[in-house]
Amino acid sequence: LKSVDLPNGVERVIMHKCKSLTTIDVPDGIELVYSNVLTSNNRFEKLIDLSECTSLITVNLPNSVKEIGESAFYNCVSLKNVSLPNELEIIGSGAFVGCSSLTDMEFPNSITEIHDSAFAETSLISIVLPENLTYLRFGAFVGCKNLSSVTFNCTALECIEYCVFGACNSLTTIVLPDGVRSLGELAFHHCTS
């Protein structure tokens, strides 16, 4: 199974460890992309699990997705293209951990929270953080060795937590937004450039 185009109305999809899947169009109506669907306590009935789909290259998410949950794309090592929906609010802990082929991400302005290690160990090169971002959690971009440029378009961000950009070896310049009142310990630890 290499490509899946699901019809609207499908509410729960488990593609966990589907090793040959390369492309999926997620149907409108899905509200959460989440790993460990079987243990999610039915918090959301309309969800999809795509973790450890190691050949997955492209994911098109509909505007109905409001949250990319914990470990949603964990270890999708071939993932290069993710279209984030315009209404997305939260990117959960470890959502893209280990997506080592992910070099680009356009964040919609609707995002308010990027959680712990959300993009840890990806290959992002340059990011523009959205204007409504209020929480940038622990290690959100830790280990992004190719990350060289970060632009803060956010006006509500007050705290950059512990080790957010730790081990981002290519990061050379960063200008923090005026509203930031707290910079966590080791926020730029091992940024050797």
Image: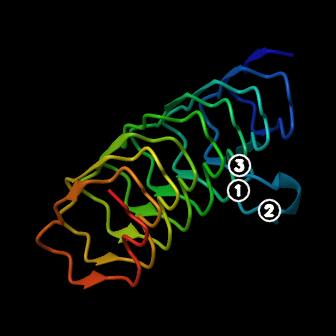
Q: In this view, which residue lies farthest toward the left?
A: 178
Quarter holding the N terminus is top right
Kind of residue at disc 2: Ser
Q: Is residue 159 above or below residue 127?
A: below
Percent x, y of residue 92? 57, 60
Q: Nearer the viewer, mark 2 or mark 3?
A: 3
Q: Nearer the viewer, mark 1 or mark 3?
A: 3
Q: Which residue is mark 2?
A: 40
How busy is the neighbourhood of tag 1: few (under 14 within 10 Å), some, or many (20 plus)? some
Q: CA distance from mark 2 to mark 1?
A: 8 Å
Location of residue 11 (image quadrant): top right
Percent x, y of residue 37? 82, 53
Percent x, y of residue 70? 66, 59
| Residue ID at (61%, 40%) | 100
Kind of residue at disc 1: Phe
Q: Secondary structure at mark 2?
A: loop
Q: CA distance from mark 2 to mark 3?
A: 16 Å
Quarter holding the C terminus is bottom left
Q: Secondary structure at mark 1?
A: loop
Q: CA distance from mark 1 to mark 3?
A: 19 Å
Percent x, y of residue 142? 50, 62
Disc marking residue 44: 1
How busy is the neighbourhood of tag 3: few (under 14 within 10 Å), some, or many (20 plus)? many
Label 1–label 3 contact, CB within 8 A? no
Q: Is residue 89 above or below residue 65?
A: below
Disc marking residue 74: 3
Say whether disc 1 or disc 3 marks the residue closer to the N-terminus.
1
